[in-house]
Amino acid sequence: MESLKLFCLFGILIIGSVGECKAVIGDHGSKKCNFPAIFNFGDSNSDTGGRSAAISEITLPNGETFFGRASGRACNGRLILDFISEALRLPYLNAYLDSMGTNFRHGANFATGGSSIRPGGYSPFHLEIQLAQFKRFKSQTIALHKQLKLNSTLPRPKDFSKALYTIDIGQNDLAHGFQYTNEEKVIASIPDILKVLSGVIHELCKEGARSFWIHNTGPIGCLPYSVIYYQQKPRNLDRYGCVMPHNKVAQEFNRQLKDMVIKLRTHLPHAIFTYVDVYSVKYSLVSQAKELGIKEFLISWVMVMAGFVDPMNFCCGSYYGYHVECGQKAVVNGTVYGIPCKHPSRHISWDGTHYSEAANKWVAKAIVNSSVSEPPVPVSEACCQKQQA
């Protein structure tokens, strides 16, 4: 560990400004980091085309609300990551695995739908594979820059140390455990899961990463999919219709994740870590869906004065009567399954597992402005805050 600290310090001396707040003063006296790029690691909550490029295409109606086409996202529009990009005035991230018409000038997205932190989940692109992809991307970028001197579709070598590194992964580790084991075994696996995550972050530090924006996992028990398949036990649901045992496991994962971040601040003192409590925002959205929906629509004037529908309803696909994935249709005994809803912006859940663009936008507003981050800084200042134990 001491050698890693020295390595990170040595990297600071070479790069010069890494870890400093080379910021500009904004309109209200705040300091902004001017991140030149984002490098994202995660699962379908932040996948912008990896799974579509490498495993199976995510088709319409995914993407139709905002992009007007299939965009590689498991959503009708934008993801939380897209709103973070907007807040930083950066382009939407292209998936590293997508080779068609991609531009990585302002970062790359290594997230892939179904990915987990540990191997053996729903996708072969677990977090250590994403790390390996990043290392290759960085080394090839630097090599090409030396050869060509100028490449408008790749980051500049100095951008790797000045970029924001976003991490949103872990939900599939829990979901896979729920599916094949039980809650007790999932809880017992959390320390090993987070050991892998910590190791990946240490490796990213070696590669020059300095500003980390780490999301905790959301209330998996509030996903309609979880409610449909795991509500069978008596008194298993809370007053908002969420599966309590699953949410308790998610909360335990987040407690240990937060402890891990605190330790990382000690072990890697030249890196900046922001822990983002996505769980509390998503749970607030589910538990106060009607009231929060009304408030949101009045502020933005994007819809008539109406709140979100029941958060356990979803817009695309079907798990009731007949299982149909979003983007597919099936006719069973004259009944058509899989027809998407007419007003996706009134739904919190898009397809039973993923959030709608309207929900992502609502969550992102809380995330980017510092109200649920620790330390409490907006994403635009995530290179500058004082560390908190």
Image: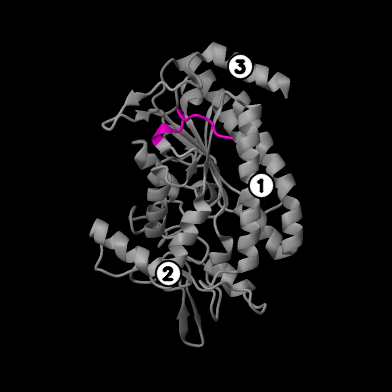
Q: Residues under labels 1 and 3: Cα distance? A: 27 Å
Q: Residues within 10 Å of mark 2 (few under 14, many from 20)?
A: many
Amino acid type at circle 2 is Cys
Give the number of callouts: 3
Residue drawn where x is 53% and y is 65% of the image: 223
Residue sticking out furthest to the front? 389
Of tags 1 and 3, the one toward the viewer is: 1
Label 3 belongs to which residue? 9
Chief secondary structure of the magenta portion? loop
Q: Is mark 1 on a helix, strand or loop?
A: helix
The dot on residue 256 is 1
User: Which residues make up the magenta segment?
Assistant: 380-389
Quadrant that contains the C terminus: top right
Amino acid type at circle 3 is Leu
The residue closer to the viewer here, 167 or 73, is 167
Of tags 1 and 2, the one toward the viewer is: 1
Residue sticking out furthest to the bottom? 333
Q: Position of residue 351 (x, y in %)?
A: 48, 65
Residue 128, quarter of picture: top right
| Mark found first going from the N terminus, 3 or 2 | 3
